[in-house]
Image (cartoon, rainbow, N blue to C red):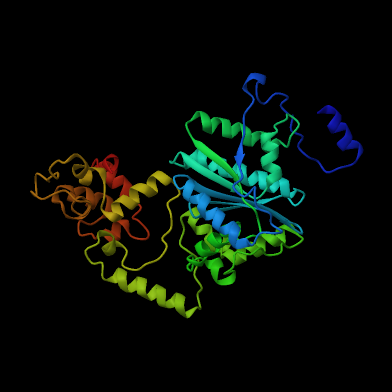
Amino acid sequence: MDIMKILVSELDLPIVNIEQRKLLLFQPWNTPRFHHINPFASYSNSTVAPVVFQRAFAYHRSQYSRYSAIYTDGSKRGDYVGCGVVIEDVTHGYRLDPSCSVFSAEAVAIYRALQSIDSKMPRKYYCMYTDSMSVLEALENYNDRWHPVVCNILDITSRLYSKGFDIVFCWLPSHVGTHNYIHRVWQETWNQQILNKLHNIHPSTSHWAALPVRRHDVRLTRLRIGHTRFTHRHLLLAENAPECPSCFSCCLQRLAQYKSWSQQLDNKLHSVKPVIGAWPVMPMRRTDVKLTRLRIGHSRFTHRHLLFGERAPECPSCHVSYTVHHILIDCPVFNNYRITFFNSSQLTLPDLVGEIPHQNLFAFIRRIGFLYLL
């Protein structure tokens, strides 16, 4: 590895991470045995019509009907290198570095499929199809000097075999109709995603050319899929979605929200906040949480009985169930404290917990012993 670092430095190549190769991935007495099947060995692409391959493939699938089919493929077109996996009609696509070869793309597709099986697949029987005979031969003729992804495939395959999985690898000829099944499944699956923002722009599963500058390509992709920091950052920060102030449809949406909220007269918060809008946040998170509980009328003291299956707590003086409204506004036991802190015993909830809460609110609830019961 040190020699490679010196060579990279002398050749003035870009900074790369050099991975140290394991000399013995498998013990000599535990060398993996890999085998693949080829139901099309007796056919030739040049002399046999595609329909014959399709019928042979249909017969092969009838023999392996208990095995779930997994289709893998890799491709390289210009500056784009990628691979795909289809597992039970679910498509997974992966983009690789443009310097990767077709062999690498085909191998990575198989490796990704095996990772999916290892992580979340409940079934035990799988038949994996690939059109890369070179990868299958490399897996059968294992050597420590082979491609690192080939070694990783053998490693995860051995682990899956030890877990009781039965995985059959099968070569599938390309460009004769059978391998096009992958693309047909992709297209049929994508045709159903009519609500996806990208579907209106790109209804086909064919590749699009990438822009030469990476950051420009990323920004174009974000525009295509309809996801940007400006339009979606509120999901991460738990804020209101940004709205267009002049758009008619946005105005109609806001009017519908206002109308719906104006009808929620039984909602405890409605009496405090009759109009939809953003209110200022308290500087301390703990204080803001307590204020919110007072506004919505939910506290541990008034609602814990719902969790423990107990009777609702009652005010011994008024013989009614305790509520936030009763404690802050109605109960005559605390009238003297109301006069002390608010200079009046005739109050409303918006006076105390409105958009600008009363400056003595927390001193009042601390004095009556309600602060630590919220």
Can residue 360 be seen from the camera position used here? Answer: no
How many discs mark residues in the rendered view? 0
Q: Residue furthest right?
A: 10
Q: Is residue 171 left or right of residue 116?
A: right
Query: Is residue 171 shown to the viewer in this render?
Result: yes
* Residue at 50%, 75% in the rendered image: 245
**Residue 205 to residue 293: above or below:** below
Q: Nearer the viewer, residue 372 or 79?
A: 79
Q: Position of residue 303 (x, y in %)?
A: 22, 46
- 338 or 154: which is nearer to us? 154
Which residue does the image show at 38% across and 75% down from the upper left? Answer: 255
**x, y (%) of residue 214?**
73, 57
Residue 143 falls left or right of residue 238: right
* In this view, 108 is above or below 89: above
Q: Residue 107 versus residue 35: which sits nearer the camera?
A: 35
* Residue at 47%, 31% in the rendered image: 164
Q: Residue at x 49, y 35 (%)?
A: 165
- Quadrant location of residue 79? bottom right
Left of 303 or right of it: where is 111? Answer: right
Q: Where does the image place residue 289, in percent across and percent down from the top left?
A: 36, 48
With 166 as the anchor, is 83 left or right in this view? Answer: right
Q: Is residue 339 above or below residue 155?
A: below
Residue 130 location in percent, x, y?
A: 62, 48
- Who is closer to the viewer here, 132 or 355? 132
